[in-house]
């Protein structure tokens, strides 16, 4: 590993790896520091839905081949509402745009393969990473590996270390503002080697709580049910999970459910979170390090990718053209798009989930929301336009 690099990237999730690859393609050297092992990163089951802009950027980075072969293009999805099904025709409503179902695990694997082939240094098991001297011209990052204490000097630090990372924490409290909403429930997810209930996704609203039928491939299903935030995975046997999922689906879908043993089961809390600004001196935050959305809108990974689109262009302009306008605008440019995705994810979450104790007002509003959506092409267009992804600019 070099002692000095242009960009020290903290975090080897999709944001950090994609940034590394785009910088490498532009001839700018960087080092990725990741706390966990590669196997650990690749075993996390997370996002499944890629926006068109994400697909385009992955292709541009040279990691589109397997995604183009194995990814499933989805032209629409269903919203189930007390037995009714509303089909949202994404392609028809959003000017021909679609989404691609291709797991985050696969995106990450493709990025690792491309970075290995390029010889970009990735340090796994980097402990106690500390970005330092961020407001000077000579920032550096210290960390520990099996070989001992290390110091990496750099021009910039990219904080791509996710929600629980250290980079956002390195910003003094009086220089950052946090906006947050925590939802009083979580999502329990289950992965199973069985064909999905149908080809397209189903987002189901039900008096028992929200449910989602998704997939990773025609033989691999991913299901979620809304659960109390304090529940533990051990509370949920596979049978209990499937009983609950089945009860929340319309009959036609419930009849198609094939129960297989879970190969992964986990609970994720739901949260909306934005840290502003996304820059502190020579530190730039990107992805979950700066913002979290509840998963209902399928936006988290896609936002990480759009941040990297803006940040890579800004760093390339700095190193290749000695032009800092894009770097100076990075935080504002990224946040403008982030807040629109926050709004959409909050709205879709609020409409689809069961909220306790609201005296019935909230439920009536949800019903009116669904009725309006079902009867208005304009409302469906707004949903579709956001779901396929707003332009990267
Ligand atoms: P990541 O993926 O969390 O990667 C951050 C990396 O940083 C490492 N790290 C550190 N490294 C060094 N030093 C430290 N101190 C470190 N601290 C942490 C971590 O080990 C990790 O490898 O963030 P990134 O790259 O910003 O990517 C964000 C996405 O992972 C996330 O937004 C999505 O997974 C969210 N999400 C979804 N997004 C979508 O676009 N579409 C979806 O369909 C979708 N579904 C989901 C989701 C997230 C879920 N969960 C579990 C939160 C479904 C679920 C259930
Ligand atoms: C998933 O397949 O994991 C998934 C799909 C759509 C979402 C969230 C998660 O909105």
Image: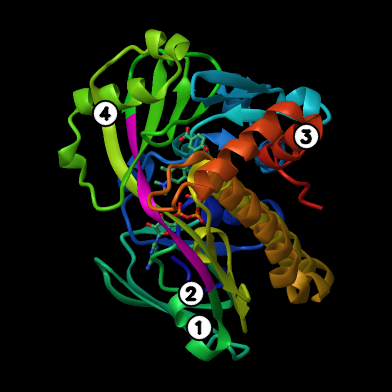
Instruction: Give whichever of discs 3 and 1 has the lower sequence position.
Output: 1
Where residue 9 appears, as percent x and y from the top left, is: 52, 65
Marks 4 and 1, Cα distance to the nearest angstrom?
A: 41 Å
Q: Secondary structure at mark 3?
A: helix
Q: Are marks 4 and 2 in contact (CB under 8 Å)?
A: no
- Residue 67 appears in the figure: yes
- On the image, the x and y values in percent for residue 66 come to 57, 26
| Dot placed on the residue nearer the N-terminal end, 4 or 2 | 2
Question: How far apart are the two marked residues, 4 and 2, measured between alpha carbons?
Answer: 36 Å
Mark 2 residue crowding within 10 angstroms, few (<14) / some (14–19) / many (20+): many
Tell me, yes or no, whether the two marked residues, 1 and 2, touch with CB atoms within 8 Å: yes
Question: Magenta region: which residues?
Answer: 179-190
Mark 1, residue position: 171
The quarter of the displayed image where residue 156 is located = bottom right
Q: Which disc, if any, is residue 256?
A: none
What residue would you read off at disc 2? Answer: 168
* CA distance separating discs 3 and 1: 39 Å
């Amino acid at each position: 590993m070099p002692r000095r690099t242009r960009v020290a990237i903290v975090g080897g999730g999709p944001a950090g790896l994609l940034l590394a690859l785009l910088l490498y393609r532009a001839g700018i050297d960087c080092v990725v520091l990741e706390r966990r092992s590669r196997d650990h990163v690749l075993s996390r089951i997370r996002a499944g839905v890629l926006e068109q802009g994400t697909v385009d950027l992955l292709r541009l980075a040279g990691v589109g081949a397997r995604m183009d072969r194995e990814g499933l293009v989805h032209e629409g999805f269903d919203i189930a509402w007390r037995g009714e099904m509303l089909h949202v025709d994404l392609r028809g409503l959003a000017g021909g745009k679609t989404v691609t179902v291709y797991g985050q695990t696969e995106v990450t694997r493709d990025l690792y393969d491309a970075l290995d082939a390029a010889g970009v240094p990735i340090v796994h098991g980097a402990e106690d990473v500390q970005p330092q001297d961020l407001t000077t011209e000579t920032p550096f990052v210290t960390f520990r590996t099996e070989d001992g204490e290390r110091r990496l000097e750099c021009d910039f630090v990219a904080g791509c270390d996710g929600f629980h990372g250290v980079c956002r924490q390195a910003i003094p409290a009086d220089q950052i503002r946090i906006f947050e909403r925590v939802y009083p429930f979580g999502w329990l997810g289950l992965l199973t080697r069985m064909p999905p209930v149908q080809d397209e996704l189903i987002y189901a609203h039900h008096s028992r709580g929200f449910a989602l039928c998704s997939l990773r491939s025609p033989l691999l299903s991913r299901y979620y049910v809304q659960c109390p935030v304090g529940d533990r995975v051990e509370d949920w046997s596979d049978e209990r999970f499937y009983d609950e999922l089945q009860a929340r689906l319309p009959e036609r879908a419930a009849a198609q459910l094939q129960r297989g043993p879970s190969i992964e089961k986990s609970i994720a809390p739901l949260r909306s979170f934005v840290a502003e600004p996304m820059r502190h001196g020579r530190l730039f935050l990107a992805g979950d390090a700066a913002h979290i959305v509840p998963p209902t809108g399928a936006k988290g990974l896609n936002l990480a990718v759009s941040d990297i689109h803006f940040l890579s262009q800004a760093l390339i302009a700095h190193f290749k053209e000695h032009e800092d306008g894009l770097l100076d605008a990075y935080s504002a440019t990224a946040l403008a798009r982030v807040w629109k995705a926050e709004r959409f994810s909050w709205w879709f979450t609020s409409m689809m989930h069961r909220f306790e104790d609201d005296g019935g007002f909230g439920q009536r509003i949800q019903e009116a929301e669904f009725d309006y959506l079902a009867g208005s092409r304009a409302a469906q267009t707004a949903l579709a336009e956001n779901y396929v992804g707003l332009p990267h600019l």
